[in-house]
Amino acid sequence: MLPTARPHAGALSRRRRSVDFPGEVIFNCGVSGRDRPDAGMEGDGQRPDPVAPPGQPQGEHLQLLLRRSREAKNCAYCPYSRFPVGAALLTAGGEIFSGCNVENACYSLGVCAERTAIQKAISEGHTSFRAMAITSDMGDHFIVPCGACRQVMREFGTDWDIYLTKADGTYIVKRLEELLPLSFGPEDLSKA
Ligand code: THU
């Protein structure tokens, strides 16, 4: 098990190696009837997955976060790219805010799903986040956030988990610190 690939209780048993991310372990989040009674068990159904780190979503909470990102994707307004994306953001208090990409005829005004979700949460008074799940229609690749979204996420800390999924529901998980190393944040403004 690599340090960056932490299985979460509720992650199902089918594990493969990723082509996009060599060495990465892929988890199956249970799309289209893959949920099984031995959810949370290793491949032989006998050994429980290691428990997720404290504060991180696990089990059915993680399933809900992943589902909310898939549902948000259905609302994507993307007539120009035809590339729908959904995101679901878990606050420290346990609420979920979802978002989709919203494009515009003036192309540069389009907003990514991740930033839509963050702006919804911030505008409702939430500034502390635990995790985000991101979903697209890509079957062979995990969706990854663009650089602008990584920087907007980083505004709210580096210590949270980003679930990157494929259309079949499999996912890998990355710390924001991994997605945006050596980042610039609010604390840096007072260092000059
Ligand atoms: N997009 C997202 O919403 N999130 C991502 O992680 C990658 C890209 C959107 C932006 C644009 O509407 C479309 O996907 C194609 O780039």
Image (cartoon, grey):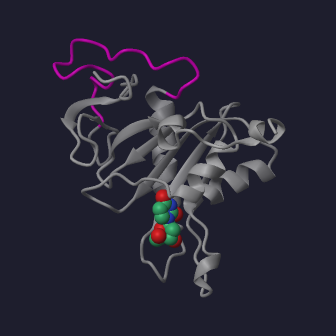
Question: Please, is residue 1 above or below residue 165 in the view?
Answer: above
Question: Please, is residue 89 above or below residue 43 in the view?
Answer: below
Residue 132 shows in the view: yes
Residue 73 shows in the view: no
Q: Which of 50 and 179 is in front in this view?
A: 179
| Among the 4 quarters of the image, the one containing residue 84 | bottom left
Furthest residue in direction front, as rendered:
192
Residue 160: where, in percent of width, then height?
A: 57, 33
Residue 112: where, in percent of width, then height?
A: 57, 64
Furthest residue in direction bottom, as rendered:
105
Residue 29: where, in percent of width, then height?
A: 35, 39
Furthest residue in direction top, as rendered:
47
| Among the 4 quarters of the image, the one containing residue 149 | bottom right
Question: Please, is residue 53 above or below residue 165 in the view?
Answer: above
Residue at x-position 50% and y-position 18%: 53
Residue at x-position 31% and y-position 14%: 48
Does the stretch in magenta take in 131? Answer: no
> Is residue 169 rendered to the left or right of residue 185?
left
**Quadrant occupied by the N terminus:** top left
Residue 187: where, in percent of width, then height?
A: 76, 36
Q: How many marks?
A: 0
Q: Nearer the viewer, residue 135 or 21?
A: 21
**Quadrant occupied by the C terminus:** top right
Q: What stretch is highlighted in magenta?
A: 35-57
Q: Nearer the viewer, residue 84 or 149?
A: 149
Furthest residue in direction left, as rendered:
44
Magenta: main secondary structure equals: loop
> Is residue 97 rendered to the left or right of residue 70?
right
Question: Please, is residue 79 above or below residue 143 in the view?
Answer: below
Residue at x-position 63% and y-position 46%: 153
Residue at x-position 76% and y-position 49%: 122
Does the stretch in magenta take in 37? Answer: yes
